[in-house]
């Protein structure tokens, strides 16, 4: 009986603990307040970068809104030259440390935003207005949201400022990578044929064999291109099981020659062929090997168009038979 009593006591204790845990389970609630902290160095002058590859940043700080529990949030910022401007007129600034309230904002992003707020048309307009010699007082708000919960998005009720921001002319331009292989440009008809990816061929590559970031995805390292596959001369005789009969291709981020330093391939091995003939019509998704020298291959016996998306950040490739307009849901492409 004594043992049974001890067991029952233990069970009751465990159930009591479980009940307390269930009662204490955090419950989400819509936040009502959110503030941003005035920067300690708000009067210090700094110059915004004018190159997208420049990683210089400045900082903004805010604490997490009260969601009822410690949530994983995304933080970003808004900027304006007029603190009383309607919120829709403020320009969004991405945070380089998105899950941290200690935000690091690229000065290049700020420079682009200020050029837009000032209505700068081009570099000549910027120079004519002498904007490079004018310090600007910039106002900032913070933004916080829990991914997937629309009602969680909240903008700080207050704003802060940096008071001596100098800018240069800055604009975002689509970046690009190159395709190398058995492909041709649909518009010009130029054929690549594994043309050496060297600096001496840069003009040819840029004019005919580049995949570009879409205008609404600049800076995302998502590249889109439409090309024709060029059949191998021996394709009809060899058949689809022969990798050497496949039209093959790979990518280079820079034209440094046949080195793997700037290559994006299907495999580490040079000229390995990842055959995707049975997948590309429905849509092929695969992994990219950074600095890989392998190719993707499709068996065709006549020129056929294909649409390609390369995600350099996630190291993913998407291939779809035909010429398609590409849109994105997040980073996922849709072939329309």
Image (spheres, grey):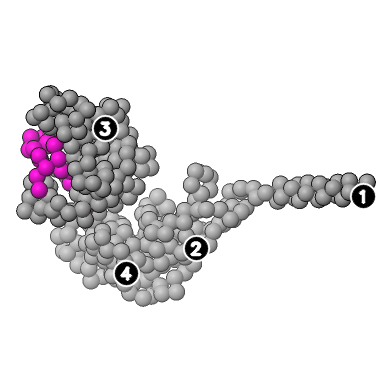
4 or 2: tag closer to the N-terminus: 2
Residue at the image point whose x is 93% and y is 46% from the top: 1
Question: Are the residues at dot 4 and dot 1 in contact (C-beta closer than 8 Å)?
Answer: no
Q: CA distance from mark 4 to mark 1?
A: 78 Å
- Viewer-side label of 4, 1: 1
Q: How many marks?
A: 4
Instruction: Give the SS element for disc 3.
Output: loop
* Residue 174 forms part of the magenta stretch: yes
Q: Which quadrant holds residue 50?
A: bottom left
- Viewer-side label of 1, 2: 1
Q: CA distance from mark 4 to mark 3?
A: 52 Å
Residue 270 showing in the rendered view:
yes
4 or 1: tag closer to the N-terminus: 1
Q: Quadrant of the C terminus?
A: top left
Q: Position of residue 323 (x, y in %)?
A: 21, 30
Q: Position of residue 274 (x, y in %)?
A: 25, 37
Tell me the residue that label 1 is attached to: 2
Q: CA distance from mark 4 to mark 2?
A: 21 Å
1 or 2: tag closer to the N-terminus: 1
Q: Check residue 183 in the rendering and tell me which mark sits there, or answer none.
A: none
Q: Residues within 10 Å of mark 2 (few under 14, many from 20)?
A: many
Q: Check residue 165 in the rendering and tell me which mark sits there, or answer none.
A: 4
In depth, the one of 277 and 128 nearer the eye is 277
Q: Residues within 10 Å of mark 1 (few under 14, many from 20)?
A: few
Question: Are the residues at dot 4 and dot 3 in contact (C-beta closer than 8 Å)?
Answer: no
Q: Principal SS element in the magenta part?
A: loop
Tell me the residue that label 2 is attached to: 62
Q: Check residue 276 in the rendering and tell me which mark sits there, or answer none.
A: 3
In the displayed structure, would residue 297 be above or below residue 250? above
């Amino acid at each position: 009986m004594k043992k049974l009593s001890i067991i029952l006591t233990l069970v009751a204790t465990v159930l009591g603990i479980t009940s307390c845990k269930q009662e204490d389970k955090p419950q989400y609630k819509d936040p009502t307040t959110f503030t941003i902290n005035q920067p300690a160095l708000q009067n210090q002058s700094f110059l915004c970068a004018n190159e997208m590859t420049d990683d210089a940043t400045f900082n903004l700080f805010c604490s997490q809104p009260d969601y009822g529990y410690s949530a994983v949030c995304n933080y970003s910022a808004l900027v304006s030259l007029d603190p009383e401007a309607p919120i829709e007129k403020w320009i969004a600034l991405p945070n380089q440390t998105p899950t941290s309230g200690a935000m690091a904002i690229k000065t290049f992003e700020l420079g682009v935003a200020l050029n837009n707020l000032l209505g700068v048309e081009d570099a000549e307009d910027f120079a004519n207005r002498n904007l490079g010699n004018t310090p600007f007082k910039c106002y900032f708000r913070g933004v916080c949201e829990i991914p997937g919960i629309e009602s969680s998005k909240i903008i700080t009720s207050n704003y802060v400022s940096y008071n001596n921001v100098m800018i240069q002319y800055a604009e975002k331009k689509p970046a690009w990578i190159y395709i190398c292989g058995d492909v041709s440009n649909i518009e010009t008809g130029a054929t690549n044929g594994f043309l050496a990816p060297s600096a001496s061929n840069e003009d040819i590559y840029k004019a005919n064999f580049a995949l570009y970031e879409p205008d609404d995805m600049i800076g995302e390292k998502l590249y889109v291109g439409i090309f024709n596959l060029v059949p191998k001369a021996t394709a009809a005789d060899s058949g689809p099981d022969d990798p050497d009969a496949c039209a093959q291709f790979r990518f280079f981020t820079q034209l440094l020659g046949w080195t793997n330093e700037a290559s994006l391939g299907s495999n580490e091995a040079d000229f390995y062929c990842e055959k995707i003939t049975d997948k590309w019509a429905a849509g092929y998704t695969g992994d990219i090997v950074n600095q890989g020298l392998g190719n993707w291959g499709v068996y065709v016996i006549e020129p056929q168009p294909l649409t390609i998306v390369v995600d350099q950040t996630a190291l993913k490739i998407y291939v779809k038979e035909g010429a398609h307009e590409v849109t994105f849901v997040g980073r996922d492409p849709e072939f329309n």
